[in-house]
Image (spheres, rainbow, N blue to C red):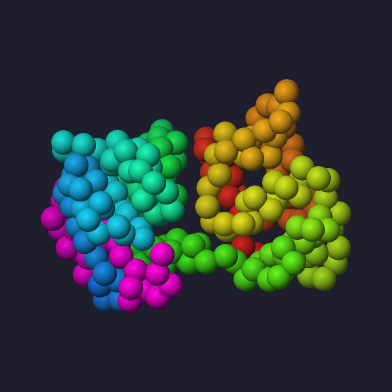
Amino acid sequence: MSTTTGKQKILIVDDEPDILELIEYNLKKEGYQVFSARNGQEAVAEAKKTLPDLIVLDIMMPKMDGIEACRIMRTMPEFKNTFMVFLTARSEEYSEIAGFNVGADDYIAKPIKPRALVSRINAILRRNAPPEEVTDNKLEIGNLVIDREAYLVYKEGVKVVLAKKEFELLYLLASKPGKVYTREVILKNIWEDSVVVTNRTIDVHIRKLREKLGDDVVATVKGVGYKFEAI
């Protein structure tokens, strides 16, 4: 993916012309290259042509909705690392969960506030760059230093000792700040070889991380999973 906003490509998918025009105007003003489509079928075809860095999809659209379009694109190798963001007026929790379950990276609710939208998209695209990653398998994020080789964490220079699975869970979440990890993905990455692991196991480890590093380090996305918040 590109590293400068002037080269980054965004595909906007919505069946409302006014919404397309508003988003396109504000993103072009920010320096992005913007493409558009009016339903899920057009989105898949346009994405294959343009290979965008980020796709903003409305959920409720004719011919093919955003959920199905996202699900289809996530099966294609060329969109494995493409950011998918849902844009919808529906505030029901189940629509957010459905979006995350098919591979969405984030969720933006209507009515659209241009400045907030641009700010969110800028932040999402920044996730593609590793967070201040330094040598020797260390991550530096805010006031945390996470040392992969030593299985140690330092908060504001003070060593914090974590259990092995606590550390692995923290490292997974911190490797992409802001990205929502579902419980299924967490279980597969951290406890793949374990025989008996439940959602309660994840909850306990998250609670331990919050006790040791602060409540604001890991955020809960209700009904979906967890994400790391840069401190």
In the picture as drawn, the residue positioned furthest to the front comes out as: 77
Horizontal side, residue 121 vs residue 132: left or right: left
Q: Position of residue 43 (x, y in %)?
A: 22, 48
Identify the residue at image location x=28%, y=40%.
69
Identify the residue at image location x=31%, y=59%.
52
Locate the C terminus by quadrant: bottom right
Magenta region, residue range: 1-25
Q: Identify which residue, 158 or 2, lies in the foreground.
A: 2
Q: Position of residue 211 (x, y in %)?
A: 78, 49
In the picture as drawn, the residue positioned furthest to the left comes out as: 17
Q: Position of residue 81 (x, y in %)?
A: 43, 53
Horizontal side, residue 116 vs residue 211: left or right: left
Locate the N terminus by quadrant: bottom left
In the image, residue 229 above or below residue 105: below
Q: How many marks overall?
A: 0
- Was residue 18 drawn as part of the magenta stretch in this picture? yes
In the image, residue 159 above or below residue 42: below
Identify the residue at image location x=52%, y=35%.
223
